[in-house]
Image (spheres, rainbow, N blue to C red):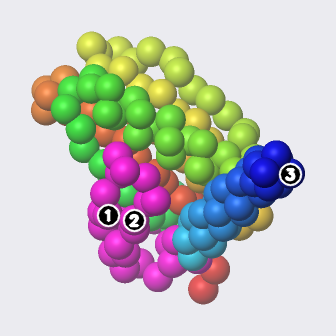
Amino acid sequence: MKMRFAQLILIIPMVLGSNLSAQTDAFCDQLQSLMVQAGDGVTTSFHLSSRTLAQVDCAPSRGLGGTVSLHCAWPFKYRSMQSLDAFESLLGQVAACANPIAADTSSVNHPNSYDLRQFSSGVGVISVPLKDKGALNQTYVFLRVERPFMP
């Protein structure tokens, strides 16, 4: 009996670890696909494997420097714990796929707050900002993928 219990203790972390690894790989693949779709100029649906972030539509945009982007936004109640949990969850997922390059927690010139984290992938830049919008009484978690335009 003790031998079986010991074997079970060794097996459980391996099973859980492989499941987490599969989830991470799936998210990274989804993020990579989103990066490729940024150049299509089409609104794209994106769903995160997080309980706090539902599926949203991500809107395309073009940058002045010849970049293409997709922006995804999740609204929450103003400065709610759910918004912070979602931000931290998204940061953790993105950090498993890309390398951190910048964090901007500088203050803004109005009562709202702003926290930006950026990551480098092989294709472009992934940004995860948290923004308070006092006038709207909402806090937003954003995901932006940006890459050079390739015709």
Q: Residue at x 48, y 27 (%)?
A: 115
Neighbour class for label 3 at 10 Å: few (<14), some, many (≥20)?
few
Q: Circle 2 sits on which residue?
A: 47
Q: From this viewpoint, which residue is outermost toward the left?
A: 136
> Up-down: is 47 above or below 87?
below
Q: Nearer the viewer, residue 132 or 13?
A: 13
Q: Residue at x 67, y 34 (%)?
A: 102
Pointer 3 residue: 3
Disc 1 marks a residue whose amino acid type is Gln
Which residue in the protein does label 1 denote?
A: 55
Q: Residues within 10 Å of mark 2 (few under 14, many from 20)?
A: some
Name the kind of residue labelled 3 in the image.
Met
- Sequence-first disc among 2 and 1: 2
Question: Is residue 67 visible to the viewer in this orientation of the structure?
Answer: no
Residue 135 located left or right of residue 108: left
Q: Is residue 63 above or below residue 114?
A: below
Task: Read off the magenta span.
Answer: 34-62
Tell me the distance, in whole angstroms, between the alpha carbons under discs 2 and 1.
Answer: 4 Å
Q: Nearer the viewer, residue 24 or 58?
A: 24
Of helix, strand and loop, which one carries label 3?
A: helix
